[in-house]
Amino acid sequence: MSLEEKRNQIDPTRIPAHVAIIMDGNGRWAKSRGLDRSEGHVRGVDTVRSITEIASKIGVTHLTLYTFSTENWNRPRAEVDALMALVGIAIARETPDLIKNNVRLTMMGDLDRLPSETRAMLDGCIEATSHCTGLQLNLAISYSSRWEITEAVRKLAREAAAGLLNPDDITPQTVSAAMAAPEMPDPDLLIRTGGDCRISNYLLWQLAYSELYFSPLYWPDFGKEEFLDAILTYQLRQRRFGLTGDQVTLNTK
C-alpha cells in the first residue's frame, strides 16, 4: 500500500491532537551496520524531519519528541558531546524549513544543563519560529518525568509556604498547571520505537490515559508509512477513560 493510500485511510475527524514519541534505537541501528553510534543519531535527525512533516500534513497539532533524557547525561562523554553538537547543528539547519512549514519549536527540560552553544541555537530557533501557527514541535531535552514532577512539587510547596496556595485546594488541574508545558494537551498517543515496551521516565503524569504504540523498528527505520500505521491503529481503539464501552458508545451518538 502506498503512502497516499494509507493517508486516504486516515479518518480526519479522529486525528490525535498530541503525539509523543520516544525515539529509541539510533545507537543500535548504527551498531547493527558496523557504524559508530553517532551515525545513528545523524540518521535519526532525518527521521525527525520526515515524521514532523507527515504529522503536520495530517493535522497533528502537537508533537513532543524525547530528545535527550536526564539519564542520558550518564552516557560516555564523547557520545554526549556529539549529541549536543548534533542537536544544535540540526536545529540551525532545519530552522528555515520549520518556518516555511509554519512549525513552531518549543522545548522543556532542565535546560540550564545544556552547553551554551547548543542552548543558543535552540533559543534562536524558538525565537525565529515563535510566530508560526501550525504544528508545535516540542523537544523534551535534558528531561525526565521525575525531574518535572519534582519541580512541580517544589513550585507548589513554595506557593503554599508563601501563603499563596492552600494545600487543601490542590487538585489534579493544579498539578497539571505546574508542569513544564501546561499549555499543551496531554498526549493522545505515545509511540516508542526500538522494540522496548516501557515508558522510561517520560511524561508520566501526562500519559495517564494516552494510547500506547510500540514499534520493533529502530528510529532511523521508522518512516512516514510506519507513522501512519500508528495513527491507523490509534483510530481503531476505543478510548474509554474509565467508562464502559457501552457508555462511550452512548455518549458519542
Image (spheres, helix red, strand yellow):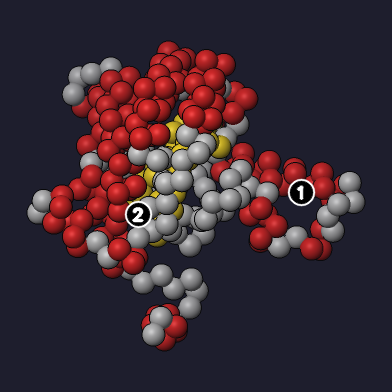
Tell me the mark number nearer the camera, choosing from 2 and 1: 2
* Residue 59: numbered disc: 2
- Which quarter of the figure is the C terminus placed in? bottom left
The answer to whether any part of residue 164 appears in the image is: yes
Q: Residues within 10 Å of mark 1 (few under 14, many from 20)?
A: some
Q: Residue furthest right?
A: 163
Report whether 199 appears left or right of 97: right
Q: Which residue is mark 1?
A: 156
Q: Amino acid at mark 1?
A: Leu
Q: Nearer the viewer, residue 120 or 208?
A: 120
User: Which residue lies at the image location 54% right of the left edge and 22% below the top edge?
Assistant: 119
Point 57% across, 53% down: residue: 205
Q: Are marks 2 and 1 in contact (CB under 8 Å)?
A: no
Element at label 1: helix
Q: Is residue 203 left or right of residue 55?
A: right
**Image quadrant containing the N terminus:** bottom left
User: Where residue 114 appears, x then y in whole percent?
Assistant: 56, 22
Do we see residue 215 in this rendering? no
The correct choice, above or below, for 3 with respect to 209 in the image is above
In terms of depth relative to the viewer, which is nearer, 24 or 123?
Answer: 123
Between the residue at mark 2 and the residue at mark 1, the CA separation in whole angstroms equals 35 Å
Q: Residue at x 57, y 35 (%)?
A: 109
Task: Give x and y (percent) for residue 172.
Answer: 66, 61
Residue type for callout 2: Gly
Label 2 or label 1, whichever comes before in sequence order: 2
In the displayed structure, would residue 104 be above or below residue 15?
A: above
Quadrant of res 33 = top left
